[in-house]
Amino acid sequence: MDFHNNGSNGWLGFRMEFLGSWFLCVSTVFMILLPSNVIKPEDVGLSLSYGLSLNGLLFSALITSCFVENRMVSVERIQQFTNIPSEAEWVKKDNPPPPNWPDQGNLELRDLQVRYRPNTPLVLKGITLNIQGGQKIGVVGRTGGGKSTLIQVLFRLVEPTGGSIIIDGIDISTLGLHDLRSRFGIIPQEPILFEGTVRSNIDPIGQHSDEEIWKSLERCQLNDVVAAKPGKLDSAVVDNGDNWSVGQRQLLCLGRVLLKHSRLLFMDEATASVDSQTDAVIQKIIREDFANCTIVSIAHRIPTVMDCDRVLVIDAGYAKEFDKPSCLIERPSLFGALVQEYASRSSGL
């Protein structure tokens, strides 16, 4: 985009200079040919001295107009943001969840329907299922089927168009957004770190002691890395965590979840950006430290869902299959077709 803009500005500047030079030449010839009683020679010299600066003035005007136009984009976006409807209430003091909620991790979807904007087709078209506390659920399906939308609506980044979500007997639509989101753990596909320190990234609210943070770092195999840095827990983390590798960023996100001790963990293709060795470390920690938690995992690798208690196959916004992986493989199913397709691709590499 910048290359395109620079090229356009350069071409426009060239044409402006060409027109300015042509106009100056024509004006000079015209003034020279005029009789001296019509225009005095000193006036001709004065006109030419001012005319020589014409190209510079035109180019400066061009640069200024382009600069103003680019900066006005920010004003337009701010104006758009002021018209965006705000999210639901952050905290509902009259209806807080119980202190230990969710304590079981039961998750029930009742005819869940979701669309991103009014007058657009439904992305989720009426999903009904019941997940018992402690179960490990793998969510698979084709691209665009609605897998990531399911995670977004559970965190109420997108509000349901119809139906309801019940977690341990409480409809999540009745809760404040902070009360809801602070009780869940999530490991996103793209590991997100914020500018600050290791401490502020792994414990953003400052609820845990240094001992607890070090235990979490040790569990996700980052204690040696952090201890080797001069600032240790106060070591700098730049914006987006660019001074850390992708694997280390993902492990820090995992350590953040370990500190929360949530009964519900959501994983949106959490190991898609890391190597196989880091993937194995993350899977091992999840099996051991979240053994009693309810886990909903969107998987991009078929082998990662083979150990799940159940597999949910979402296709075109519908929950087409929801059963044990072994049962789905034994009979003709969408999941079985995905397994065969993955196996054939893997053998062809």
Image (spheres, rainbow, N blue to C red):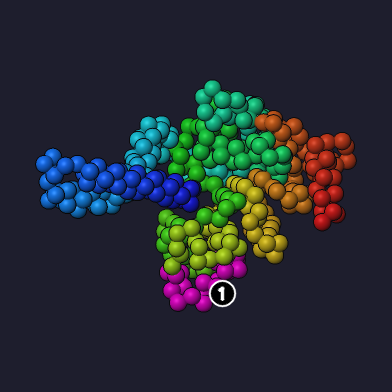
Residue found 70% across the figure and 48% down from its top = 300
Q: Quarter of the image for the C terminus: give it.
A: bottom right
In the image, the segment drawn in magenta is 216-235
**Is residue 111 positioned above or below 243 on the image?**
above
Residue found 37% across the figure and 31% down from its top = 83
In the structure shown, which secondary structural element does the residue marked by tag 1 occupy? helix
Q: Is residue 58 visible to us here?
A: no
Asked whether 222 falls inside the magenta stretch, the response is yes
Quickly name the residue at label 1.
224
Q: Is residue 109 visible to us here?
A: yes
Residue 207, horizontal then vertical, whole percent? 43, 58
Residue found 69% across the figure and 48% down from its top = 299
Q: Is residue 20 left or right of residue 144?
A: left
Q: Is residue 253 left or right of residue 316?
A: left
Name the image quarter holding residue 127: top right
Residue 231, horizontal then vertical, whole percent? 43, 74
Residue 196, horizontal then vertical, whole percent? 41, 62
Residue 63 or residue 33, whichever sits in front: 33
Asked whether 99 falls inside the magenta stretch, the response is no
Residue found 52% across the figure and 68% down from its top = 214
Q: Is residue 102 left or right of residue 297?
A: left
Residue 205 or residue 87, whichever sits in front: 87
Residue 344, horizontal then vertical, whole percent? 85, 49
Residue 7 or residue 255, whichever sits in front: 7
Q: Is residue 220 left or right of residue 62?
A: right
